[in-house]
Image: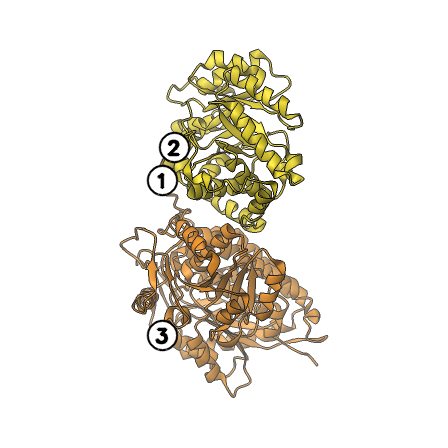
């Protein structure tokens, strides 16, 4: 019989979106001096709020505030800094539903992901680094490691709050102060986080949030008084940042694009591998730098896996991000949708076979159905370029050596997945895959204790874990 | 309601004749099935458990769940009086509401089959546990006699237990042959094979036992006796639903699934229905192909049903004990 799930929308009454937002500088919301822009709900195209744009002078004010606050914050005993971080973590938990709903409205991701993945990991990140604040002498950087100073941080739109946590929590724990620029399409949760900083009585200037697009980000990372640049985003922008800070003494960590191979051997737990494939590419609409966007199937099981994968994809529910049963939400912006469409068309033109399950897309908003391309070879652009959408390219291999070769044959190296019931093969593969993270019999698992970062064009530096501390500390005298 | 599964052997099954030709070939086949990753299976089950079933969908699910209940009493202290009361409950779960559907079956020990039959006639099926339930520790003759006696007393369905000792010792062909023999003894009665998944322990074993029983010709695969903890769980049922789905794809034969024991709340029951819907598919969403082995679950379903209809939550005293 037909079991239709009735709509189960999460109420948006819990969030109070203001008509306009200023910049958060030195503990207060202030007007920006650039040209204000709008943040849009990608599921409906409705304008959510007007956001101030920080011009170079605003960025300068924010950096000065951070510099002024650095003196007190860096000299504060670690155990006192940790109290603030614990307080922030607890407030995030208390306000988790508000944060999750706002994140889904502004970003388009399904509420089940913002509620069950993003926000819990955000809180966990603050808890984790709160614990480090008074133990920095165990970071592996000598007995008396020192903070770097003012960190200029630029984050992407795919995990707005989670990337904020990855950047701010370790920076603050180590005694740095920060100026953070959220992405122009998803600034709202960062601005709500600014309110949380106020609620936690965080000293003024320790966290500053400046909103804007590329020009604001450029003003921030090139500001002469910024000691450390942390960026997560596209490889193109990452390279531009690296060029712009070359020759300065700024330290930098860059977490960039990826084209991860998800490798399924013939002795894999097939049903769980199918789940891992689906989670690997369709989680967060595929807007994930470590997404498993290249599926490498051993030829002997390729047909079986593809049949199961297609059947599973037909059960994915695409639609209203606030519906608790939605699996795939909206594409974050019109520009991103255009890019996904363009690359999908190139895939077809180059001869790959395109398939999507029958699924009705809402008329307003930005949507793309879950899509898989079979018959893809290494020469296809959809096997080379990061699509950053719910589009999977399927390739096959015959032997473990061939799998390694194909997996590594990419300018990127952020993550990889290996599916096999054979333990020794997992170790064999993990040794040879040039990727920052190798998941075995799972995919897209994140934990604050586990470092994350890339090889090659996927960037440098590590975030998370003890390793993540070295991005914000220098060895002391 | 009578079950209507086809009893004619499917041509798809003949492709597997070689598999059950010898102990060695059967073992090779069962151990060649894809493994089950425990973490992944449990995560998938938990993920399906977060589906939010509200309003009209919930009303549909509650009624469907009621029609899938095998209302069960399997106690040493069962008496004809107690069993008659339960049989009446099966016919009219909610005497206050004539729109409330009957359950699928009443599940009792073999000696109580006649008592149930007197009350329910042909309106509700009678299921009997057999084959030295719950341990399965008896000779083949005793198990078959147990089965025949229950069928002769009028049982529509037989719930047998497998010999877990033989399974865990790797004597798969013995388990296979027992199921084949019991199936034959069932005649026209439908056979459910209980694995006691709490004793098989690993999901790999659950998948192997599922294929073993399906190849042997069972009509249903069932998780547990209710006498061993853990009984039915969502991940175990997930693995079994994947097995019946794959088996139908391979052979064209559809097999039913019955989680039993430990399902107590309406919310849990709905999670199982979501899982049936999304893993095996809507074809399994009928009492012909999916059952709940339960007792206290029924009143929980009734209370939620009344609450949904009236907006008020009545206490347990507003629903009959049995």
The reply to the same-chain question for discs 3 and 1 is yes
Tag 1 residue: A4
**Placement of B292 over or under B35, stated as above or below:** above
Callout 2: SS? helix
**Placement of B271 over or under A186, stated as above or below:** above
The reply to the same-chain question for discs 1 and 2 is no
Q: Residues within 10 Å of mark 1 (few under 14, many from 20)?
A: few
Q: Residues within 10 Å of mark 2 (few under 14, many from 20)?
A: some
Give the image quarter of residue B285: top left
Circles 1 and 2, Cβ within 8 Å, touching? The answer is: yes
Q: Which chain is yellow?
A: B
In the image shown, does B55 or A67 lie closer to the viewer?
B55
Q: Is residue A224 visible?
A: yes
Residue A163: image location, x then y, percent: 49, 65
The reply to the same-chain question for discs 2 and 3 is no
Residue A175: image location, x then y, percent: 61, 71
Tag 2 residue: B60
Q: Is residue A60 visible?
A: no
| Quadrant where the image shows the N terminus of chain A | top left
Q: CA distance from mark 1 to mark 2?
A: 9 Å
| Rendered image: mark on residue A34 | 3
Residue B279: image location, x then y, percent: 45, 43
Task: Say whether residue B299 is left or right of residue A35.
Answer: right
Q: Which colour represents chain A?
A: orange
């Amino acid at each position: 019989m037909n079991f239709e799930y009735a709509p189960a929308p999460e109420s948006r009454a819990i969030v109070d979106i203001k008509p306009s937002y200023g910049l958060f500088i030195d503990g207060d919301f202030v007007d920006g001096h650039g040209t204000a822009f709008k943040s849009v709900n990608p599921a409906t195209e409705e304008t959510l709020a007007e956001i101030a744009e920080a011009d170079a002078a605003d960025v300068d004010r924010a950096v000065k505030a951070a510099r002024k606050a650095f003196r007190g914050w860096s000299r504060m005993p670690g155990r006192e800094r940790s109290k603030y971080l614990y307080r922030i973590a607890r407030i995030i938990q208390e306000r988790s539903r508000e944060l999750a709903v706002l994140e889904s409205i502004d970003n388009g991701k399904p509420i089940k992901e913002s509620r069950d993945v993003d926000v819990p990991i955000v809180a966990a990140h603050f808890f984790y680094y709160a614990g480090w604040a008074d133990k920095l002498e165990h970071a592996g950087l000598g007995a008396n490691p020192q903070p770097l100073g003012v960190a200029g941080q630029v984050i992407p739109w795919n995990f707005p709050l989670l990337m904020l946590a990855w950047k701010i929590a370790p920076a603050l724990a180590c005694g740095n102060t920060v100026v953070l620029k959220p992405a122009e399409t998803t600034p709202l949760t960062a601005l709500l986080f600014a309110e949380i900083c106020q609620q936690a009585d965080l000293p003024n200037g320790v966290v500053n949030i400046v909103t804007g697009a590329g020009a604001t980000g450029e003003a921030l990372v090139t500001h002469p008084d910024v000691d450390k640049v942390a960026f997560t985003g596209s490889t193109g922008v990452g390279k531009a940042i690296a060029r712009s800070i070359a020759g300065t003494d700024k330290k930098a960590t860059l977490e960039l694009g990826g084209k991860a191979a998800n490798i399924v051997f013939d002795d894999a737990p097939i049903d769980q591998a199918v789940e891992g494939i689906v989670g690997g590419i369709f989680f967060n609409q595929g807007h994930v730098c470590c997404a498993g966007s290249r599926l490498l199937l051993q030829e002997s099981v390729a047909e079986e896996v593809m049949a199961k994968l297609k059947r599973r994809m037909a059960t994915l529910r695409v639609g209203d991000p606030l519906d608790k049963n939605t699996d795939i939400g909206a594409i974050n912006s019109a520009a991103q949708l255009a890019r996904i469409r363009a690359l999908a068309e190139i895939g077809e033109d180059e001869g790959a076979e395109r398939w999507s399950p029958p699924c009705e897309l809402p008329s307003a908003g930005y949507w793309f159905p879950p899509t898989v391309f079979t018959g893809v070879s290494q020469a296809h652009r959809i096997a080379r370029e990061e699509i950053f959408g719910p589009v999977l390219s399927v390739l096959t291999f015959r032997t473990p050596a061939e799998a390694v070769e194909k997996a590594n044959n990419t300018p990127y190296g952020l993550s990889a997945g290996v599916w096999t019931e054979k333990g020794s093969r997992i170790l064999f593969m993990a040794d040879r895959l040039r990727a920052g993270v190798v998941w075995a019999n799972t995919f897209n698992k994140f934990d604050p204790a586990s470092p994350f970062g890339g090889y090659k064009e996927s960037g440098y530096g590590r975030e998370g874990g003890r390793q993540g501390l070295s991005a914000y500390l220098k060895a002391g005298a | 309601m009578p079950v209507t599964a086809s009893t004619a052997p499917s041509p798809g099954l003949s492709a597997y004749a070689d598999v059950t030709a010898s102990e060695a070939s059967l073992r090779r086949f069962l151990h060649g099935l894809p493994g089950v990753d425990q973490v992944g299976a449990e995560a998938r089950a938990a993920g399906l458990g977060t589906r939010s079933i509200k309003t009209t969908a919930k009303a549909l699910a509650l009624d469907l769940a009621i029609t899938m209940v095998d209302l069960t009493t399997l106690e040493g202290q069962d008496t004809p009086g107690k069993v008659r009361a339960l049989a009446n409950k099966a016919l009219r779960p909610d005497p206050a509401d004539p729109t409330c559907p009957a359950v699928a079956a009443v599940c009792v020990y073999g000696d109580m089959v006649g008592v149930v039959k007197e009350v329910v006639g042909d309106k509700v099926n009678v299921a009997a546990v057999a084959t030295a339930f719950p341990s399965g520790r008896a000779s083949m003759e005793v198990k078959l006699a147990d089965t025949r006696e229950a069928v002769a007393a009028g049982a529509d369905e037989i719930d047998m237990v497998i010999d877990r000792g033989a399974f865990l010792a790797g004597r798969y062909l013995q388990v296979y042959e027992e199921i084949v023999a019991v199936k034959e003894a069932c005649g026209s009665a439908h056979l459910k094979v209980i694995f006691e998944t709490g004793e098989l322990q690993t999901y790999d074993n659950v998948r192997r036992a599922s294929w073993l029983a399906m190849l042997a010709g069972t009509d249903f695969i069932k998780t547990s006796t209710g006498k061993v903890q853990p009984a039915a769980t969502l991940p175990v049922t997930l693995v079994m639903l994947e097995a019946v789905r794959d088996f139908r794809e391979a052979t064209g034969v559809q097999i039913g699934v019955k989680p039993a024991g430990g399902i107590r709340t309406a919310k849990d029951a709905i999670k199982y229905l979501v899982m049936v819907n999304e893993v095996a598919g809507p074809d399994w969403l009928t009492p012909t192909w999916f059952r709940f082995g339960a007792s206290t679950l029924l009143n929980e379903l009734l209370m939620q049903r009344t609450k949904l209809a009236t907006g008020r939550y009545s206490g347990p005293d507003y629903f009959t004990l049995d």
